[in-house]
Amino acid sequence: MSQFARIAWIIIAGFIAMELIAYGVRVHDESVSATGAYAASVVDRAVALDRLLGDASPEEQERLLAAASASDFHASLSSTEPKVPQTTWRHAGEISAELDAHLRKIGAPDVRIGLSDQRTVTVVVPRSTHDYLIVRAGGTALATHARPFVGTVTTLIVVGLVLWATRRSVRHLPRFAEAAEALGRNAAAPPLAETGPREVRRAAAAFNEMARRVRAYLDERTHMLAAVSHDLRTQLTRLAMRLEYVSDANQQARAREDVAQMTRLLDSVLAFSREDRADEPAISLDIGTLLDTLADDERGLGHRAEYHGPIHCVMDGRPTALRRAFTNLIDNAVRYGGEADITLSSDDGRVVVEIADRGPGIPAADRARALQPFQRLEPSRNRTTGGTGLGLAIAHTVVTRHGGALTFSERAGGGLVVRVELNRTSK
């Protein structure tokens, strides 16, 4: 889960909890205040009706009671004291306290009020004529239902704004992962833009400084190896010239081969070091033409090499590095497997190159080690054929710098298949 998703879940959970708490408080307050207010209004109407009835004749009282009554308000007179329903409503204690205070305020402390389970308000008003005015009210007029999540729309808007702001705050984090991946593929990758909040700018500056030091270290190592290679090459040239004075032809030939192997080793080490530096820019190149040309070069040297695939397949890459990588892979297939069967396939986003041979292959347990520099696999590669243990390492480095992958598999009928997957567009 991404950092933004974690923060988003925390924010959403917090707002939901706040909304639930606010809803509970709102329901309580509306239940108490609305019910108390309605009951107080019924009491006021009952007290007003009692004063209106006064000493009116029975006929006038009946007309007044009929006129005051409605579907949710019924008034009547009784000569006997009625039983007031027990107050059992939710929050009845708070409501009763408010009603008692209201009765004292209007000067009617003798009035009794009952709140029944049928959500009905019963008001009994003792009259000076020794009878009782009974008022019952309720029904739809009393029903008070707080709308659930009244502020849902507002909450959603606030959550959206907060998530948008959070997204903007964390949008810089993926840049560091992308920059680290680019630096891993190419030490000469462009620096990370030092934009955003102060902390992000400081982190970007620190990352760029680290990348600069890595490039400086690679440059220093490459220059050192180049200097050592130059000096050793000079000494090897002198040694080769002095071999002309060796009278034993057999010893002379062996010494010359040793000098040649040392020269090849120096060239391989320097090539690997330069490849690790990865200065060459990526351009649009035809990988199909390159592979077909390399296969033709091998056939020109008398080796068995065939290319299968489209003649033209354009992709982004570093041409010199890719030529070196595929040359190493094809040379290995011819040298150790007797042939190189090259197959190219592609789709909109990827290019896949498979180089198959008929050699002894590489044991599965040794395949990871085979990609490390200076690793020669004696069980599957004959030492007498030469090699410095850098061919596969250079090819692997090139493929990795292109954001691709190099893997091994067994070939049907015996042999090794080297599979190279590359992006068609540079990253």
Image (cartoon, helix red, strand yellow):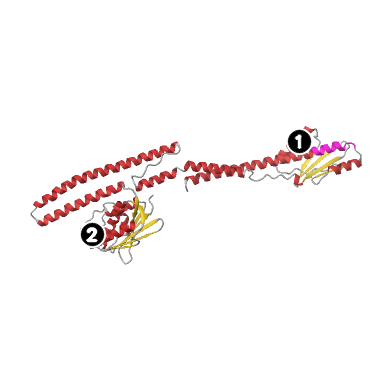
Foreground residue among 298 and 133:
298
Task: Report the residue marked by disc 1.
Answer: 100
Q: Is residue 57 above or below residue 387?
A: above
Q: Classify 10 Å Cα crowding around label 1: few (below 14), some (14-19), many (20 and above).
A: some
Q: Nearer the viewer, mark 1 or mark 2?
A: 2
Residue 25's image quarter? top right
Task: Report the residue marked by disc 2.
Answer: 382
Q: Is residue 259 visible?
A: yes
What's the residue type where badge 2 is placed? Asn
Q: Which mark is residue 246?
A: none
Where residue 258 sits: x, y (%)? 17, 53
Where residue 268 sits: x, y (%)? 24, 51
Label 1 vs 2, first from the N-terminus:
1
Q: Please indicate whether residue 384 sits to the left or right of residue 344 in the image.
A: left
Residue 104's image quarter? top right
What's the residue type where badge 1 is placed? Asp
Q: Is residue 50 magenta?
A: yes
Tell me which residue sits at (78%, 35%) in the image: 103
The secondary structure that most of the magenta stretch takes on is helix
Give the SS element for disc 1.
helix
State the CA–CA distance, disc 1 to disc 2.
106 Å
Where residue 148 sits: x, y (%)? 65, 46
The magenta span reads 44-55
Where residue 271 sits: x, y (%)? 26, 49
